Structures are given as C-alpha cells and as structure tokens.
C-alpha cells in the first residue's frame, strides 16, 4: 500500500528555533523513549538536481548543512532555525528512514515543479512527536516569482 502525498503550500509566520547539534545522527533521529525531543536537519541540494523533474536519487537528501534539536529538558540556546517564509510542505504520520525521506523529497520536488513552483536548494527535514506518534515533515522554501 502506498501513501498519497499531498503537497501543501505552507506559510510559516515565525521561525522555529533549535539548539545546534553535532554530529548529525540522521539515521536514528529519535532516541528510544524520548518523545519530548524534536529534531531538524537542513540539507543543501545540488543546483543541477534541485530543479529537475527527474532528479537523480543519489542527490537526495543532499549535503548536510546543520542539525538541531528542541526539547528533552535541557537548557538550550537557539542557534539554528527553520526560517519564517513560504514552503512546499509534506508530512507523514510516522518516522521515515533515509531512503523514504529521499523518495518523499523527490516526489515533493516533482509535484512542486508540476504546479510551476520555483523551489530553493534547501531541504529541511523535521522529526517530531504529535499525539504520542512520530511525524516526519519536509519543507522546501518557495522562491518568489
């Protein structure tokens, strides 16, 4: 069974701030039993692949730029942000692995191009818990026409 992707145009009115973390542990974003934590990863996509309707799968999710976390009861100083602005947005109500995130990012790009949206080369990947369940969200900034 495949999930239907719904591309949403989301306007984030205020930035979401995170404490920067390193190194980037992308493959295991949720430590067991830590549902208070929220993580974000930012990737830079290859310019040549970021606007193709048929991008190369190995180009996704792209080169890591930063990783950040919120929650967990630690005193954290915000250092990285998901900036306010307009985004192409998709989410899944489960935790996706690296391959699933890459496939969803490519599908998001194809859908956005089909709708004639111009996307930036940045891809933001956010993991969080809502109602006790993991959620995976992908954000791509929409460039102004």
Image (cartoon, grey):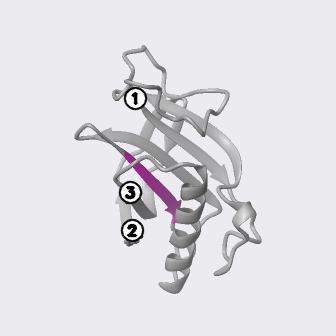
Q: Nearer the viewer, mark 3 or mark 1?
A: 3
What is the magenta range?
135-141
Mark 1 Cα-neighbour bin, 10 Å: few <14, some 14–19, many ≥20:
some
Q: Earlier in the sequence, mark 3 or mark 1?
A: 1
- Image quarter of residue 4: bottom left
Q: Quadrant of the N terminus?
A: bottom left
Dominant secondary structure (helix, strand or loop) of the stretch shown in magenta: strand
Ranked by sequence position, the earlier of labels 1 and 2 is 2
At mark 1, the secondary structure is loop
Count neighbours of disc 2 (C-alpha within 10 A) and say few if under 14, some if 14 to 19, many if 20 or more: few
Q: Residue at 56%, 78% (x, y): give it.
A: 110
Element under disc 2: loop
Dot 3: what SS?
A: strand
- The residue sitting at 69% across, 44% down in the picture is 64
Residue placed under numbered mark 2 in the picture: 3
Q: Is residue 36 magenta?
A: no
- The residue tagged 1 is 37
Residue located 55% across and 56% down the image: 101
Q: Residue at x 64, y 81 (%)?
A: 53
- Any mark on residue 92, and which? 3
- Percent position of residue 125, x then y: 52, 49
Q: Nearer the viewer, mark 2 or mark 3?
A: 2
Instruction: Measure the C-alpha gap from mark 1 to mark 2.
Output: 26 Å
Are the residues tagged 1 and 2 within 8 Å (C-beta)? no
| Residue 140 colored in magenta in the image | yes
Residue 91, quarter of the rendered image: bottom left
Of tags 1 and 2, the one toward the viewer is 2
Q: Which mark is residue 7?
A: none
């Amino acid at each position: 069974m495949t999930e239907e992707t719904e591309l949403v145009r989301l306007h984030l009115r205020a930035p979401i701030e995170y404490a920067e973390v390193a190194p980037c542990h992308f493959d295991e974003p949720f430590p067991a039993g830590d549902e208070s934590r929220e993580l974000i990863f930012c990737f830079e996509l290859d310019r040549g692949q970021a606007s193709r309707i048929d991008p190369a799968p190995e180009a996704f999710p792209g080169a890591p730029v930063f990783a950040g976390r919120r929650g967990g009861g630690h005193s954290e100083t915000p250092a990285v942000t998901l900036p306010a602005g307009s985004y192409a947005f998709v989410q899944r109500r489960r935790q996706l692995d690296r391959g699933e995130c890459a496939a969803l990012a490519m599908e998001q790009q194809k859908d956005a191009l089909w709708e004639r949206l111009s996307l930036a080369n940045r891809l933001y990947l956010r993991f969080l818990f809502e109602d006790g369940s993991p959620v995976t969200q992908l954000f791509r900034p929409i460039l102004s026409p």
